[in-house]
Amino acid sequence: MKFESNVQTKPRRMVIIRNRGIISTAVLIVLVFIVYVCTLSLKTSSRQFEYASYPRTYAEYVEKEAKECHLEPALVYAVIKQESGFDPKCVSNAGAIGLMQIMPDTFHSLTAEMNKSDGREYMEDDLYDPKTNIRFGCKYLSILLKVYPKPATALAAYNAGMGNVGGWLQDKNFSDDRQTLRKIPFPETQQYTQKVLENYVQYKRLYYTQAVSAQNK
């Protein structure tokens, strides 16, 4: 009787073991799926956070004016993000106005040319208008890049002024070739330049790298 009982019990044990194996496999598959979904969700959330951190507000104006001035839109967005955080009503302690923080002196030096090209007369208060501010900011940035082809040097001039940068480039303590700044003596300008360049890299990565890759295929 014992032998018969063992014979009957063995298949039952095999079934139990097999069922446990199936259950374990199913649980493992479910866990792997959950991990995959969570990872995918985290990646999506991270990407969405990046896009929110590097917005392209006023894209209609930025893309148009950047093209007109032969600038990379990513660089314009990078400047706006650092200068005003995309606040068109922003005014600095020094009196710089709007999205791209145009100084009144810079504005007045550009108005004659801009008035002729647009057929209208600009007033200083127009700098609070995003379209106008971006137009003047892109024009000024394009001028700086013609004078200083190195983006870091042009950005330093955007922040500290052409007079300061011109003097630094003539000083061997700050420049080796009179074209590139090896060192920026103003900590604020140094930090500003570095931050804008970091923003520029992120904007290119998020919005323009894929477009360039697609064009090259």
Image (cartoon, rainbow, N blue to C red):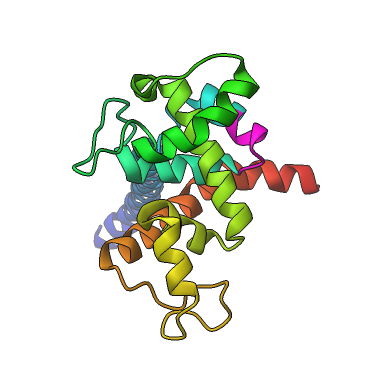
Query: Left of 182 or right of it: where is 7?
Result: left
- Where does the image place residue 88, in percent across and percent down from the top left? 32, 26
Question: Residue shown at 48%/66% (left/top)?
Answer: 166
Q: Answer yes or no: is residue 134 visible.
A: yes
Residue 192 place in picture, x, y as percent: 34, 57
Q: In the rendering, at what x and y percent does residue 101 appear?
A: 35, 38
Q: Which of the 4 quarters of the picture holds residue 119? A: top right
Q: Quadrant of residue 112?
A: top right
Q: Residue at x 25, y 57 (%)?
A: 1
List the single residue furthest toward the left: 93
Magenta stretch: give its range: 65-71
Hey, which quadrant is residue 34 in on the image? Answer: top left
Q: Who is closer to the viewer here, 205 or 1?
A: 205
Residue name at image x 27 percent, y 68 percent:
187
Of 86 and 93, nearer the camera is 93
Q: Is residue 82 above or below residue 108?
A: below
Q: Is 190 covered by the magenta stretch? A: no
Q: Is residue 194 left or right of residue 177?
A: left
Query: Per the image, is 70 magenta?
Result: yes
